[in-house]
Amino acid sequence: MALNPPDADIFDVFDLAKPTTTQQSHMSNQASQSTYRLAEQYGISLNRNLMRMDALYAFSELFTVALSSENQFLNMIQLEVKIRARSFFGQEEACIDTLSYCKGLLEEHADRLREVSALLETEECNGWPKATDPNDLATREAVSRALLKDCKYLLHRCSVLADRAVDVADFIRNYAMLHASERSISQAKEVGRLTLLAYFFLPLSFVTSLFGMNFVEFRNWRVALITALCVFVGVMIVSLVICFWDYMPWRRKK
């Protein structure tokens, strides 16, 4: 009844329809207006004689207002989860915190809905005044079943949205970990390039430093050049063997 009102003109005051984008922007004003007019509008759709005899029927529109408010709250949480799922890039930690907070709110509202559901299921044990006429009894039973059905539906929505919030948070967390792993791999590749360059430039720097010392003076520049090249080639071969040690033929045989 709260989610599918029989009389839209009467129940519009209780904001039962799913809010559009314009309605969501003015939700707080509508809620305050509905609360203000509740005393004037309450009971318009109810049978006044039956209200005097049956407590649950008399309070049914209060349950309707509460359940419709829960429905709007779940719509807001659903929109929030959807937004976080689509625009979390660059703000992963904030989105995960928001989703965790939403999950906590959903659990609190689910507990309240369970209490309301238990109240509706065991209302016969509360000692409330109850209608005795068969026609009136059928009406109040129909209202009770509708309220209980709506309450269980909202409870199911809470469970689904909580699971959705957890799934989105896990997805964002996994994305952040994957992104961090990609950055680590990229940094490791850059360090590997620098290390590989060091295997070439360090031997060259060693040879130039060695021949830059003034221990021996070469009078023939050809002899000096050939000697430097031979020393450089020898040092480079040793450096390359150390660099590619795992790819050497004798290592592959093992």
Image (spheres, rainbow, N blue to C red):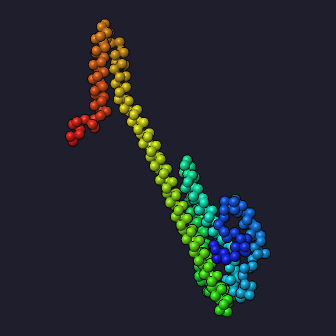
User: What residue lies at 49% left-to-right and 56% top-to-bottom?
Assistant: 171
Q: Which residue lies furthest to the top in this view?
A: 219
- Residue 127 in view, yes or no: no
How many discs appear? Answer: 0
Q: Which of 140 and 115 is in front in this view?
A: 140
Image position of 38 (left or right of 217): right
Q: Nearer the viewer, residue 22 or 223?
A: 22
Q: Which residue lies furthest to the bottom in this view?
A: 133
Residue 47 location in percent, x, y?
Answer: 72, 84
User: In this rendering, is residue 33 above or below 244?
Assistant: below
- Residue 131 in view, yes or no: yes
Check the picture and name the quadrant holding the N terminus. Answer: bottom right
Residue 77 location in percent, x, y?
Answer: 60, 62
Check the picture and name the quadrant holding the C terminus. Answer: top left
Q: Nearer the viewer, residue 84 or 218?
A: 84
The answer to which quarter of the image holds residue 157 is bottom right
Residue 236 location in percent, x, y?
Answer: 30, 25
User: What residue lies at 39% left-to-right and 36% top-to-bottom?
Assistant: 192
User: What residue lies at 21% left-to-right and 40% top-to-bottom?
Assistant: 253
Residue 181 location in percent, x, y?
Answer: 44, 46
The answer to which quarter of the image holds residue 52 is bottom right
User: What residue lies at 77% left-to-right and 71% top-to-bottom?
Assistant: 37
User: In this rendering, is residue 217 above or below 201?
Assistant: above
Image position of 42 (left or right of 164): right
User: In this rendering, is residue 253 above or below 59?
Assistant: above
The answer to which quarter of the image holds residue 119 is bottom right
User: In this rendering, is residue 97 above or below 223?
Assistant: below
